[in-house]
Amino acid sequence: MLQTKRRARVERGVTLVEGHDELALAVAAGARVAELYLCPELWRAPDWPLVEAVGVTGVAPVELSEAAFRKAAYREGPDGWLAVVADPAVPLASLALPPDPLVLVCEQVEKPGNLGAMLRTADAAGVAACVAVSPATDWGNPNVVRASKGTVFTVPVASAASDDEALAWARAHGLRLVAASPSGTVDYTDADADADLAGPVAVVVGAEHEGLSERWLAEADVAVRIPMFGRVNSLNVATSAALLLYEARRQRSRQRRG
């Protein structure tokens, strides 16, 4: 049975993936599909190999009429692909990090669109993992899956129930905490002034309205700012994360060339 409510999804350990491209990326990343619903009448182009790839795991697809599929779909303009897939999140303690990892930590970020946008950037920038702290929205939220274009299945994701849990995990992995804040004392591009993003680093961003809590600002190794030249004092959290992650990628590339 298709469920979009968080409690029902969490109890089953699943999420919904709607859309051909999102499902194809999830399957390519090894996501386990439990149910598959199709409406070939709505397909932009046939892709029976994707159906066969899902069927390899023993899942029998269910074909729906256009009317039935539109009723089951949770977004406007469905393209005829809808699946129930295992929740992409893993326990925080089980996240395996490579040497010198770049990690994104999101404290109390609420909007699925922002989490999804950050995942797309994380995938593009080669981030090792994304961690949600005290999350108001779970990684399996169908709107996170949608906004991420399926990259929630390509970037390892986990949640921490508390600041203590997330901070202990970060310190245990030797991550330098770089907090993004309008009150930061260092420009985010100034590697020579402690904004060094080239080693084992966790870029930490905060909630949409309040920003990072005092706890994270106090625990951070450095608080960096993004210079603002207009009348607003901060950028959207997903935009801020994108700037910092790509600055980290730039610094890392420069270090390897050096």
Image (cartoon, helix red, strand yellow):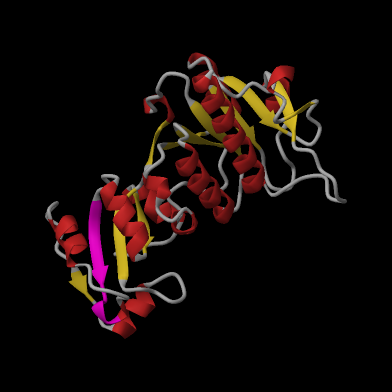
Whether 114 is drawn above or below 252: the answer is below
Q: Residue furthest front?
A: 257
Q: Residue 107 appears at what percent x and percent y? A: 61, 37
Q: Residue 245 appears at what percent x and percent y? A: 58, 36
Instruction: Give the left or right position of residue 210, taking residue 20 as reference.
Output: right
Name the quarter where the N terminus is drawn.
bottom left
Instruction: Give the left or right position of residue 77, taking residue 176 as reference.
Output: left
Whether 194 is drawn above or below 16: the answer is above
Examine the rendering and report whether any part of residue 108 can be seen: no
Report if residue 7 lies within the magenta region. no
Examine the rendering and report whether any part of residue 146 can be seen: yes
Instruction: Give the left or right position of residue 245, taking residue 227 as reference.
Output: left
Q: Residue 148 appears at what percent x and percent y? A: 47, 53
Q: Residue 8 appears at what percent x and percent y? A: 39, 55
Q: Picture quarter containing residue 104?
A: top right
Label the magenta part by its dominant secondary structure.
Answer: strand
Q: Residue at x 74, y 43 (%)?
A: 210
Q: Residue at x 26, y 76 (%)?
A: 39
Report if residue 36 lies within the magenta region. yes
Range of magenta residues: 33-41
For the residue pair 12 and 87, the one nearer the viewer reads as 87
Q: Picture quarter containing residue 196?
A: top right
For the residue pair 180 and 210, the one nearer the viewer reads as 180
